[in-house]
Amino acid sequence: MSIIEVKVPQLSESVSEATLLTWHKKVGDAVLEGENLIDVETDKVVMELPASKSGVLTKIMKADGDKVGSEELIALIDTTAVATSAPVAAKIDAPVPPSVRKLAHELDIDAASLEGSGRAGRVTKEDVLSAAAPKTAPVQPAAPAGSRPEQRVPMTRIRQRIAERLVQSQQTAAILTTFNEVNMQPVIDLRTKYKDAFEKKHGVKLGFSSFFAKAAVYALQKFPIVNASVDGTDIIYHGYFDIGIAIGSERGLTVPILRDVDKLSFADIEKQIVDFGARAKTGKLTMEELTGGTFSISNGGTFGSMLSTPIINPPQAAILGIHATKDRVVVENGQMVIRPINYLAVSYDHRIIDGREAVQFLVAIKEALESPERMLLDL
C-alpha cells in the first residue's frame, strides 16, 4: 500500500480559509494523475485540486461545503489499490469548467452525471440550468393575483468577501469623489489611425484600456500620494505602479493586478487585460494576480454608465472611474461644438489626499488623454 495525501493548496497570507465545492470522485473511484478531484473556492478565486498521482480514492475527510484551511488534509489516494470503478474517459476528455461546477454546486446538481451538450461532450451552464429547472422552478399553478413570491439564496464566499470589503472601505476611509470631463477625440483619432497596424504587429486589438492605464501612471508619477496606501497612522508611498483593473463576471467583481504598468507597453497592457477578462469568466485567476495593487481603475462605461462614484479598494487611497463616451455639446472658443466626452471620476481617501491634489491628479489624466503625445514624450 502506498498512500498519497490530498491537501488544500497553500493559500495566500490574506486568505484564512477556503470552501470545498463539489467532489468529482467518490471513495473507491479510480483517479488519474492530473485529474481534478474537487474545486476549492476562496474569497478571491475558484481553484482546481488535481490528483498528484494515479490510484484509488480511498478516503474523503472533508465533504462538499466544508470550510478548510491552508494545506489541510482532505482525502487519501492509494496508488496501489484496485478501483471499484474505472476512470470515466468522457470526464477527462471533456472537463467541466470551474464556473459550471460552481453553478452546479449552488443548485445542488451533480455535474458529472449530466450529458454535456457542448463541444466534445462538455457540460455547459445551460445543461446545469436545464437539469435544475424541475428543482428550482417547479411547475406551479398560476399565482393568485397580488402574490409576491420571494427566494432566499445564500451568498457565495466571493460575494460575501466583496460585501465585507466594500463596507470596510466605507467605514474606514473618508471617501470623497471629484469629477472632470475629457475630450476623447485625440485618443479616438490615434486609435483609428494605428489600430489595424497595431493588431497586425501585436496580435491584439488596440482598445481604450491601455490609454487609461498609461494616463493613470502619468498622473500618479506627478502625484505620488494618490499611489500611496494607509497602514494605521502611517502612509506608505509605493515606488511602483500596480494597477487593479475591475472586471465584472458572473462570479462577481474581481480586480486582477497589472504589475509595473509604467514598464509595460500598450500591447502588453491590452494582452493582459484580455487574458484577465477571459480567465475571470472561468475562475482561472490566481490569488497572486488578485492580491496587492496600489491604485485601481473601474470602467462602468462598458455597461453604459454615464457617471458614478467608485468605491476605494482598501488599503489603496484612490480609484479612477471611467464611463461611457458619448457625443455631447461643449463650448470651445465661444462656440458650441460636438465632442466625444467621457466623464471621469476619482474617489480618494481624504485622510491622506487633499482636494487640491485629487483635482490636479484628475486634471493630469485629462491632459494625458487629450494630448496622448505627453505620455509618449514624458512631458
Image (cartoon, rainbow, N blue to C red):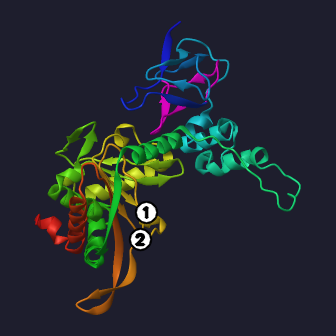
Q: In which image quadrant can residue 374 be found?
A: bottom left
Q: Position of residue 150 (x, y in %)?
A: 73, 50
Figure disc tally: 2
User: Can you identify the residue that label 2 sits on?
Assistant: 324
Q: Residue at x 47, y 50 (%)?
A: 253
Taking the magenta stretch, the answer to whether it contains residue 4 is: no
> Which residue does the numbered mark 1 point to in the structure image?
300
Element assignment for label 1: helix
Looking at the image, tell me whether mark 2 or mark 1 is earlier in sequence order. Answer: 1
Question: Quick one: quadrant of the C terminus?
Answer: bottom left
Is 4 drawn above or below residue 252 in the view shown? above
Front-most of residues 282 and 148: 148
Identify the residue shown where x is 22% and y is 90%. 333
In the image, taking residue 181 as reference, residue 246 lies left or right, namely right
Q: Where is residue 40 in the image (x, y as percent from the top left)?
A: 51, 32
Measured Cα–Cα span from mark 2 to mark 1: 7 Å
Kind of residue indicated by mark 1: Gly
Whether residues under marks 2 and 1 lie with C-beta atoms below 8 angstroms apart, the answer is yes
**Residue sitting farthest toward the top:** 1
